[in-house]
Amino acid sequence: MAAELMRVVAYTDGSSRGNPGPGGYGAVLVYVGPDGREHRRELSAGYRRTTNNRMELLGAIVALEALKWPCAVELHSDSQYVVNAFNKGWVRGWQRNGWKTANKQPVKNPELWKRLIAAMEPHEVTWLWVKGHACHELNERADELATLAADGKTGELLEDKGY
């Protein structure tokens, strides 16, 4: 019998001050251990010039990459762009079409989509859309982390080399 996967709940968000402009991502990961104690980890970083969609993707990527072993992840995002890409099968279509949309246009941010797919690989990820700014504590915290990072309040703004 295979061991049950550790269950992790993640909330991720991206922010951009202008689109493009300074931006940041935020992620909150929560795990309840066998002893019933809650463990929380927060991640964020800011970039000098980026887009909101890139930061939404990076929030999810960094959350998944932070996990040290395979987990069952319930990933909440207020980005329909990110959630629908998996729940509606857009990503599979883009891959099948050589990273082109249904309209034969190049998919934006393909390097981040590929990185996200790789980050998902060891995990069982369930994608859940959550309405932004609807007073959900962990989504609001992810938003706060992303905004603080975009404003440079959590450290030096980085270079988004893919932008």
Image: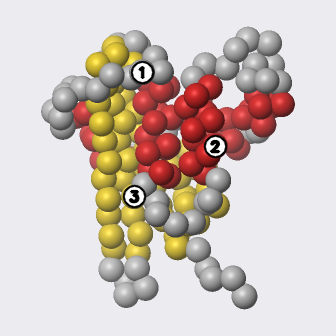
Q: Evaluate if marks 2 and 3 touch, with contact meaning CB atoms under 8 Å apart.
A: no
Residue for badge 3: 29
Q: Which residue is situated farthest in the front direction here? A: 161
Using residue 25 as the reference point, say whether residue 75 is left or right of it: right
Using residue 107 as the reference point, say whether residue 63 is left or right of it: left
What is the quadrant of the N terminus in the image?
bottom right
Residue for badge 1: 161
Q: Which residue is situated farthest in the right direction here? A: 96
Residue occupying the point 30% across, 53% down: 42
- Confirm whether residue 6 shows in the render: yes
Residue for badge 2: 117
- Confirm whether residue 143 shows in the render: no
For label 1, the SS is loop
Q: Which colour scheme is used?
A: secondary structure
Residue occupying the point 57% across, 41% down: 116
Name which of mark 2 and mark 3 comes first in the sequence: 3
The relative height of residue 106 versus residue 128 in the rendered view (above or below) is above
Name which of mark 2 and mark 1 comes first in the sequence: 2
Q: Evaluate if marks 1 and 3 touch, with contact meaning CB atoms under 8 Å apart.
A: no
Q: How many labels does the image show?
A: 3
Using residue 88 as the reference point, say whether residue 154 is left or right of it: left
Q: Where is residue 150 in the image (x, y as percent from the top left)?
A: 27, 27
- Identify the amino acid type marked 1: Lys
Q: Quadrant of residue 40?
A: bottom left
For label 3, the SS is strand
Tag of residue 25: none
